[in-house]
Image (spheres, grey):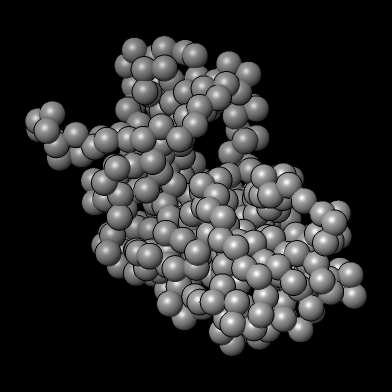
């Protein structure tokens, strides 16, 4: 078994679990025989089953798991929650060795590695920045108490989200808009303000996916009852307040791991200014508008020393548009 290849497999499985595991992490697991041959794999999907990734893989492996090695994206849990501890399932299955890529920061469930060692199983922690990244939303929630907020924006090359007359459909191309559907499907909730809900009348249901993130609308304006946001395609949560702390406490109480913010410049900038935006994804089209609505408004910055620093995570071209992903330096 090549551990790098195993971790690559786990990364793809963790990605499949995004948007379907909240409030649990998007963990994945793979089992290999003593001579390194692949046996079975699994990833947590709370929509289909309460079973954790390890248990799913072990059930698939059956007796082949005896004497085998299991590779897990997150340290196996060692507590009784909705399901029994994965550590006991690993012991009962006769697994001889465990690799895991990310330590569990949850004080309730942590310590699985030591528990397995004490049971006579060989355990090795091999850190993986890639697996840490793909599970970062849950890790962020556990360490901060709040979900990871990603603000998605489509802009012109000169940072406009609409022309001077207000027209905005479409700034980004069709391929970029399809990419957004994937972002939606990977999120537990989609957040907009009442102004966006009223003017744009968005549906906020990922196309081409069975996943149905919760639609969260924040603000005090009254939304017409026949708007798309109230259809039966997905649950809609109304936070009838302008208080950002109240909004964040509501999101935290829901147990969301990742929230995709699809708000306009006023609401998005308010979240940014308050330090709640953790990541920014821009789809920048190769067009210039010269005048129009900026994607971001006043952030309360008057001097260069107050700048908000962004860390570039990735960038790639989507049929002419440029998708850029940043981590916000001063996020919560």
Q: Quadrant of residue 247?
A: bottom left
Q: Position of residue 130 (x, y in %)?
A: 55, 45
Residue shown at the point (62%, 35%) measured from the top left:
179
Q: Position of residue 162 (x, y in %)?
A: 41, 26
- Give the answer, above or below, for where 10 lies relative to 246: above
Apparent side of residue 58 relative to residue 315 in the rendered image (left or right): right
Q: How many marks?
A: 0
Q: Position of residue 144 (x, y in %)?
A: 35, 64
Apparent side of residue 141 relative to residue 38 in the rendered image (left or right): left
Residue 161 can be seen in this image: yes
Apparent side of residue 73 relative to residue 164 in the rendered image (left or right): right
Q: Position of residue 199 (x, y in %)?
A: 45, 42
**Quadrant of the snapshot with the C terminus:** bottom left
Apparent side of residue 307 relative to residue 181 in the rendered image (left or right): left
- Give the answer, above or below, for where 227 lies relative to 241: above
Q: Residue furthest left?
A: 303
Residue shown at the point (36%, 17%) measured from the top left:
158
- Give the answer, above or below, for where 141 lies relative to 331: below
Residue shown at the point (38%, 23%) measured from the top left:
160
Comparing 7 with 209, the one in front is 7
Comparing 292 with 123, the one in front is 123
Comparing 178 with 147, the one in front is 147
Q: Quadrant of residue 141?
A: bottom left
Residue shown at the point (37%, 23%) measured from the top left:
159
Residue 40 can be seen in this image: no
């Amino acid at each position: 078994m090549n551990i790098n290849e195993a971790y690559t497999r786990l990364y793809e499985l963790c990605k499949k679990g995004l948007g379907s595991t909240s409030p649990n992490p998007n963990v994945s697991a793979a089992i290999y025989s003593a001579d390194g041959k692949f046996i079975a794999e699994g990833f947590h999907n709370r929509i289909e089953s309460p079973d954790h990734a390890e248990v799913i893989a072990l059930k698939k492996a059956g007796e082949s798991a005896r004497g085998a090695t299991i590779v897990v994206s997150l340290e196996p849990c060692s507590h009784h929650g909705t399901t029994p501890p994965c550590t006991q399932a690993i012991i009962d299955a006769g697994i001889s060795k465990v690799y895991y890529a990310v330590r569990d920061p949850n004080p309730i469930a942590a310590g699985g590695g030591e528990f397995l060692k004490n049971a006579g199983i060989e355990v090795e922690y091999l850190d993986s920045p890639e697996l840490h990244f793909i599970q970062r939303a849950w890790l962020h929630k556990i360490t901060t108490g709040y979900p990871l907020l990603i603000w998605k924006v489509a802009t012109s090359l000169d940072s406009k989200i609409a022309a001077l007359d207000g027209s905005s459909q479409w700034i980004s191309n069709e391929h970029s808009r399809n990419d957004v559907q994937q972002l939606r499907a990977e999120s537990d909730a989609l957040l907009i303000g009442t102004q966006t809900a009223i003017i744009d009348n968005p549906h906020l249901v990922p196309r081409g996916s069975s996943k149905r993130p919760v639609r969260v609308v924040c603000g005090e304006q009254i939304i017409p009852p026949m708007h798309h946001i109230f259809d039966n395609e997905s649950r809609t949560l109304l936070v009838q307040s302008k208080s950002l702390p109240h909004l964040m406490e509501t999101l935290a109480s829901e147990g969301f791991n990742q929230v995709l913010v699809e708000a306009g410049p006023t609401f998005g900038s308010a979240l940014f200014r308050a330090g709640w935006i953790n990541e920014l994804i821009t789809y920048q089209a190769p067009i210039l508008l010269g005048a129009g609505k900026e994607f971001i408004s006043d952030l309360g910055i008057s001097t260069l020393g107050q700048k908000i620093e962004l860390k570039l995570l990735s960038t790639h071209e989507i049929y002419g548009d440029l998708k850029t992903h940043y981590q916000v330096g001063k996020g919560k």
